[in-house]
Amino acid sequence: MDDLDNVEKNEKKICPSCGYENDPEVRVCIMDGTPLDPEAEAADQCPAAETSADELSGGGSLRELVEEAEQTQEDLDGALAPEETGTPKEIHKGPSVVAWLIAALMGVLCLVALLFDVGIKGGYVSLALPALRGMWYESGKRMYSAVDCYETLRVRAQEVEQWRKEKFRLGGGSSGQLLTEQQDSSTIYSADRFYYERTLLAAAKINPLDVIRQNSYGQSYLDSWFPEDAYRPRAVRRLAAQVAPLLKVEESFSTAYQAYYEAHPELEEAPPYEAVVDLLRKTKEGDKDASHAIFYDYYLLLITANDPDQKETAAKVLEELKKTPGVKPWMYLDTQLQLAQASADYGAILEACKERLKTNKEDPVALESEIRALYLQGKTDEASAKAKSLAALHNSQLAEAGKLMQAELLSRGGKYDEALAICDKIIAADEPTQSVLTASILKAKALLLKGDNQTALDTLQKLYDDPNWQQQITQEFVYTMMAASIRAQNTEVYAELAEMLESYDMAIPTQITQLEKGKVTVQDLYGKGWGDIT
């Protein structure tokens, strides 16, 4: 095998300038005209010959290539930025049209040659395209679509590995085969690392706590792929530095809270709101670091918003925090929507959704809440249009959520068969996923509204009896099944579900007992408002 390798090297003439492997009979490099033999005539060298095809295709990891591309873009942006001071620069006449055409033609030829060379050497183009597309989505604040593209990159890395093994199938145990396997392993590792890095950064742009805070899903990825801080991506390190003060505030307040409990052993429940706020104030006064102040205000908002008796106070705290210099959207967006929904102020809900979508245009909570608020405002057509747009998104989970919203709206509009058709398509996946569970619940509601009570109960009974679904059952599922058992006059199923709720110290919702007594109808439950049963 070594002999074969030597023969292949002797058959090719490698250009000393651009590295291109020419045929043996060629005396001048066909890529840039560099003489390959002493007697060959001199030719002008290609200015782009300083970078070899090997360097362009496999000289660095995918992450290094992307970082270089980002730096180049930053330099370009700086060069194109208008000067704020000084005299205007001298304006030179641009190149002729012919020069532009020649440059464009050369660019196309170089691109074709590069793609061919890169494809042969490992299929890096198939990896670079989803990476660049994902970064484009990310720059447009479409985070879920971006993560989809990064996932595609991981899958293609495995496909590249398999392709290369088949393409470069060498003798067993040879050094060439070992090198190829090492390259395959490196390709997959780089793709996985790139996926986790970009996914974490995309999540951190929405809320850095999901990445930095201990025991978060992002922290587990960081510990696995970037165990040492020095090797973590620079952007992640910057985020960690920004959030570090919050983690210190969290630790200080947690320590003070624990000390308060130890000093009051008579407490059987959580301390009253006033005591907690006073404890937070004292902890803030004892902290001499001025940069921590805004994070104490952030915790004040969380504490106030989670007390059902402090709605008005929470609204005031929210407005004060939003006016605080240095505040970040992630510090108040969740709470702002929470307070708007609690007050049933549809205008406030839509405004909160609008602000959330500025951070992530594919925020599922904001998109679904926006559709609900529009429907409850009576803007049915606008809500339907939003649901249709959601169903057309690139991300499959968001698209499925949009289809479920369409089914909900169709059912409430009396178009039961159209709603059932959408639900059946999702249920056909026959997998224990949240989408299938939600589609089954919506199907049962549509059937109840249509008057097909027994089929509604059978739809839910099938999942209830399946062991694979035991961990997926939700309160809404149980309540809908109870409503179906009442309408189907199946007292045995109703009693079983009531007993299960009692075992968890949960009461039967008032709406369900009223349905049982005939004081409300299924139209009242699932055809008006949004049908939430609590």
Image (tube, rainbow, N blue to C red):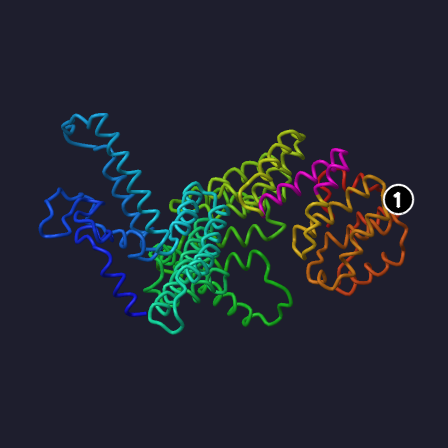
Q: Which residue is mark 1?
A: 518
Relative vertical location of residue 414 with respect to residue 212 in this rendering, above or below: above
The residue located at (35%, 58%) in the rendering is 233
Q: Residue at x 62, y 68 (%)?
A: 267
Q: Does the segment drawn in magenta span residue 78?
A: no
Give amino acid for label 1: Gly
Residue 315 seen in the figure: yes
**Quadrant where the image shows the N terminus:** bottom left
Q: Main secondary structure of the magenta part?
A: helix
Q: Which residues are magenta?
A: 397-422
SS at badge 1: loop
Q: Is residue 407 above or below residue 14?
A: above
Give percent across and percent down for residue 424: 73, 45
Residue 89 is situated, as x and y percent measured from the top left of the image, at: 15, 29
> In front here: 430 or 175?
175
**Residue 419 drawn in magenta:** yes
x and y percentages locating residue 205 in the rendered image: 43, 49
Q: Residue at x 54, y 54 (%)?
A: 303
